[in-house]
Amino acid sequence: MDLDAYLAERGGEWHRLEVLANRPNLLSPAEIDELVVLYQRAATHLSVLRTRNPDPVMLADLSRLVLAGRAAVTRSSGGFSWRPLGEFFAYRLPAALYRTRRWWGTLAVLLVTATAVLVWYMASHPEVLSLFVDDADIDKVVNQEFVGYYSEYRAQNFALQVWTNNALLTAQCLASGVLILPVFYLLWSNMLNTAVVGGIMVSRDAGGTFLTYLAPHGLLEITCLFVGAGVGLRIGWSWIAPGPLQTRRQALVAWVREGMVVAVGLVPALLVAGCLEAFVTPSALPPFARIGIGAAVWLGFLSYALVWGREADRRRPAGPDTADLPAA
């Protein structure tokens, strides 16, 4: 074996491994991956050199480097770091929300408009509303059930229940998006239920109560549902129209990965919505204060998704998870 040629060929990788292994600060995820690959290669090189009886000095130096690489890999993979979590919420999640904004934004406009029209139509046409509920049920909803629903259980238990139910519905919309049609069924069911309740309240001149008890949590809650549904539909569209540069499988895998980012990110958002519904909606605060709190939180989410999301999409580190994404 020509040791000089072998050293010239592998020396660059060994030097890079030494630099990464001796770095005192925490490594980025990309550097950790590079460190693992270089360590594995150096271990293979050491095994090859031992069978060829090379210079003992080179063997000793390479053995020391492999040991340092192993220690660095163990340290990097075993230690806890807040950096990946920070990068997720600072870049990956808002960028994913921004990239899919046309999908969930369009759904939001269409469905909110359709729901408002249905509420008005049912309130103006009692015969249509009677197909869903009778007069006795209407009186019960207006006088007891609608307002009482929000204070029926202890606030902390109610928050957990609402969070679980909304997370399940949003997850169903996101996961079923690959088949497209189930998303519209889930959205229609939710929209019809809201329209019937709204029609009941408005028909009895209780529209103000309906908005007071719906808006504080509903603005964020329904937006999260639209986000899940919109991203789910984008996943489904990826295998219908993958684009000119990707196969259907590549586009589907890339957008499923993006969908998982959104799914994880919606969990805390829905938790906030659940807390609003349990603690703010039924509280003794004036209606304008309750609606104002919900609106402030909702506008904060939209700013995070659209304003900061645009900047995050531009600034987030490039990687295989972002490079494979086709245009939204």
Image (tube, rainbow, N blue to C red):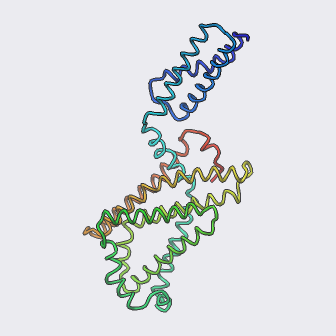
Q: Of residues 45 and 147, which is closer to you in this image?
A: 45
Query: What residue is shown at x 57% (from left), y 51% (from top)?
Result: 258
Look at the image and tell me whether residue 279 can be seen.
no
Q: Quadrant of the C terminus?
A: bottom right
Residue 29 placement, left or right of 47: left
Seen in the picture, residue 183 relative to 201 is either above or below; the reply is: above
Answer with the quarter of the image where residue 216 lies: bottom left
Q: Of residues 44 and 101, which is closer to you in this image?
A: 44
Seen in the picture, residue 241 relative to 191 is either above or below; the reply is: above
Look at the image and tell me whether residue 41 can be seen.
yes
Residue 58 image offset from top left, x and y in percent: 61, 10
Query: What residue is shown at x 57% (from left), y 58% (from top)?
Result: 231
Q: Of residues 306 and 65, which is closer to you in this image?
A: 65
Residue 147 image offset from top left, x and y in percent: 32, 76
Residue 260 image offset from top left, x and y in percent: 54, 52
Answer with the quarter of the image where residue 153 lies: bottom left
Residue that extends furthest to the left in the rendered view of this protein: 284
Seen in the picture, residue 146 relative to 53 is either above or below; the reply is: below
